[in-house]
Image (tube, coloured by chain):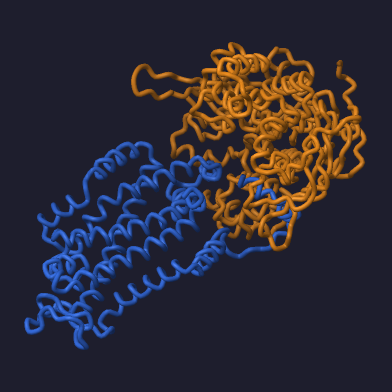
Amino acid sequence: MRAVVNQLPAEEQAQEAGNAPLAAEAPQAARIIKQLTGALRSGPVFVAFVILVIVVLSALAAPLLGTRDPVAIDPGSRLRGISPEHWLGTDAFGRDTYSRVVYGARVSLIVGAGATFLSIFLGLLFGVIAGYFRVADAIIMRVMDGVMAIPSILLAIALVSLTGGSILTVLVAITIPEVPRVVRLVRSVILSVRTEPYVEAAISLGTRVPTLLVRHMVPNTVAPLIVQGTYVFAAAILTEATLSFLGAGLPPEIPSWGNMMSEGRMYFQLLPGLILYPGIALAATLLSVNILGDVVRDVLDPKMAQKS
Amino acid sequence: MQDNHLPALEIDNLAVQVVGDRAGRHVLENISFNLSPGETLCVVGESGSGKSVTSLAVMGLLPPDALRPSRGRILVEGEDILTASPSRLRELRATRVAMIFQEPMTALNPVEKVGEQIDEVLRIHSRLGRAERRAKILAMLELVHMPDAERIYDSYPHELSGGQRQRVVISMALILEPAILIADEPTTALDVTTQKQILSLIRELQMKHNTAVLFITHDFGVVAEIADRIVVMNRGKVVEVGTRNDILARPREPYTRMLVSSVPSLVPKPRGTLRTDIVLDVKALSKTYAGKRLFGRRRSIPAAQDVNLAVRRGEIVGIVGESGSGKTTVARCVVRLQDPTSGAVLVHGEDIAKASRSQLRPMRRRVQIVFQDPYRSLNPRIKVGESIIEGLVNFGRSRDEALSKARNLLDLVGLNQDAMHRYPHQFSGGQRQRICIARALALEPDILVADEAVSALDVSVQAQVLELLDEIRQRVGVGVLFITHDLRVAAQICDTIVVMQKGRIVEAGPAAEILIAPRQDYTRALIDAAPGRDWDFQNFRPLRSSVR
């Protein structure tokens, strides 16, 4: 049915006559920006956008937001409720809950962004190699199948108990299981693009392989990678929180939302806020990322949007 | 045709609008024509003329969120489709109006046996019992000349050939004996010989049931073959309605004249013999695909076997054949997009077929290719100018030098120089194909391979691009290997024609010899099946030489 709509006669004829206006921008960029800003007019999307902006800003400007040192212990004021000094109370060691929630955003975003960047970088590299070079394909994909079979939590526990908990360990533990998904995605795009006539034309024009890949093939992976990136981002934040909650993630002194909920568990009946505040921050961040991820997917990948 | 009874279909002043378009643009405007029982009415027009939208409107199948009829009436045996309720429409669609589509594979459910798919129509719209239905379906399958109807009944679509699938679709459409059959390019995806069979089958069934046939096509050959009357459409409007002879022999409107005279003639143009040097010499070329299997012996499928041909400087050599004949395989081996299994491809005496990757690169510039699909042949993210200079830059020319050369090439292919700074989506199919030709010529190749390069274009644009190719080979002296399934196009442009069937060359020789006095049965069958071969479109008259 879509083809029918495209058959608007007026446009075709105008172009045939060579009257098409000179457009300065790339074919789709203008449309995409317009649709993305247009999507912000919907209520939930706007709220999600605002929440994410707040989270990002508070992570960047944490010291300026009336926070105290998030790791400073104050045995004199343990397990306090809401007060002018401690806006959201204190935990079992007398640490300021508000400050820890704000600094916790840093950890979550660093882990989310780091895992996204790492998995897309590695996935793109291996995916392009697997998609273009037939010899490498079988080897890389079998390795990826193997990696896919490792449960991420188990891998994280193993890594942490081997090397001790740190942001880097957690990042590696989260990234490794995500890489195969990205590799498969990139490989499938490269496989289908390499039979496109314009790629074959470039081959017969004597274009060298690196140029061929960078100029004609890799740009096709950008849109699906951005969409996949939003999923990885949300999944990474959630996995970090889960690992920290289980005690297999970051060391307890680092203020992360997962750590805070884990420690707050014991005092839940006394001070539910110890779990509630980091929990709300986590849930709101994930929901915002997912909503915005769906918007991005709808704009960049209209076919998927129609199916869902 | 007698007009003394009610027309089967009457379209009265129909207009169709784009939903939510503030400018109120119409996709169709003032469409009026009618169709009598037993008559074949051909709707012809180029892409974007609105012929498919018209057929969908008659079926009540316009996508509701995109297109909306805004005016007029569509009367099927006196009943207005546009005001009918959805359930009444559903009933009409099966029993009174039926449709067959271009691509039979997508019109059939791949996971259900074809017999059961036909059965579904009867189950919903008739009160016949199980055994009666089966008997009726088997009779219908025999009516469409299917061998072994019982076996076909229990087959899945993928087990049938393209022609057989279209027969199944036709029997599904006609089993309830509808008053109107709408056929939207039903033979476009088929080979000419199969097309001929399907056309005569539709004719035969139409005679039997006195069905009115609305036949949508872009192919004037088919029109000349089957039409009683013709509707010519352009840009969503009816240009002219008339009998077959009115339109083909005495067109009133300039647009119709232009369209009809663009149809290439099957009579080859007289050409002198060329005595220039041979630039491309293909010797004993073979390509075998190894069918992969998990267990058991590997099957090998020969796609091209022992192919020999030569192209001289400034010569256009056509390879014609039906799908699966191996013509595209030969083309791709010549450009080395595929590696031939054996044989040699000599370009100026140098063998491309066996060159290693590093040896091959300098040879690439000697042979260039233009593909069939103009919409996928240019990288949509790169400006046209950059696409054209890519090859030159690859082979070490400076950017400035390459850009000025690209501007000259755009002149050569008849495009404005400001095309350099535009993106491919700003051009029509014909213009894009010109850009592809410019890109291919940038490296000054000895050989230009055109793989169905004009098959996706409308006839009027096709005529222009063919003219361009002919002009270029004279000015630049490039040898052209022209792959096509269309004998008319081959007759227009080729000096030499090579006929291929099942991976082998059947016959080769000067175009005039092959097309007028073929020696092989297969070539004769191909020419025989070419639709509308008795009509000389350019001169608006039947061919005198034809015996009928």
Viewer-side residue, B300 vs A271? A271
Give the image location of residue B303, x and y in percent.
53, 23
The image shows residue B374 at horizontal and vertical percentages of: 63, 44
Looking at the image, which residue sits at the far left?
A: A75
* Nearer to us in this view, A160 or B166: B166
Q: Quadrant of the N terminus of chain B?
A: top right
Kindly identify the residue that appears in the image at 63 percent across and 63 percent down.
A23
- In the image, is B303 to the left or to the right of A60? right
Vertical relation: A106 (above or below) B168 = below
B481 in relation to B517, above or below: below
- Give the answer, above or below, for where B521 lies relative to B345: above
Q: What percent of the width, then of the height, locates residue B547? A: 86, 16
Quadrant where the C terminus of chain B lies?
Answer: top right
Residue B411 shows up from this direction: no
The furthest residue to the bottom? A84
In x, y percent, where is residue B73? 79, 45
Is residue B196 shown left or right of residue A245?
A: right
| Figure colour of chain A | blue
Q: Nearer the viewer, residue A228 or B107?
A: B107
Q: Is residue A52 visible?
A: yes
Residue located at (48% from left, 44% from top): A193
Q: Which chain is orange?
A: B
| Residue at the (54%, 19%) spot, across then down | B305
Tell me: residue A151, above or below residue A298. above
Residue shown at 22% from the left, 88% from the top:
A84
Q: How many marks?
A: 0
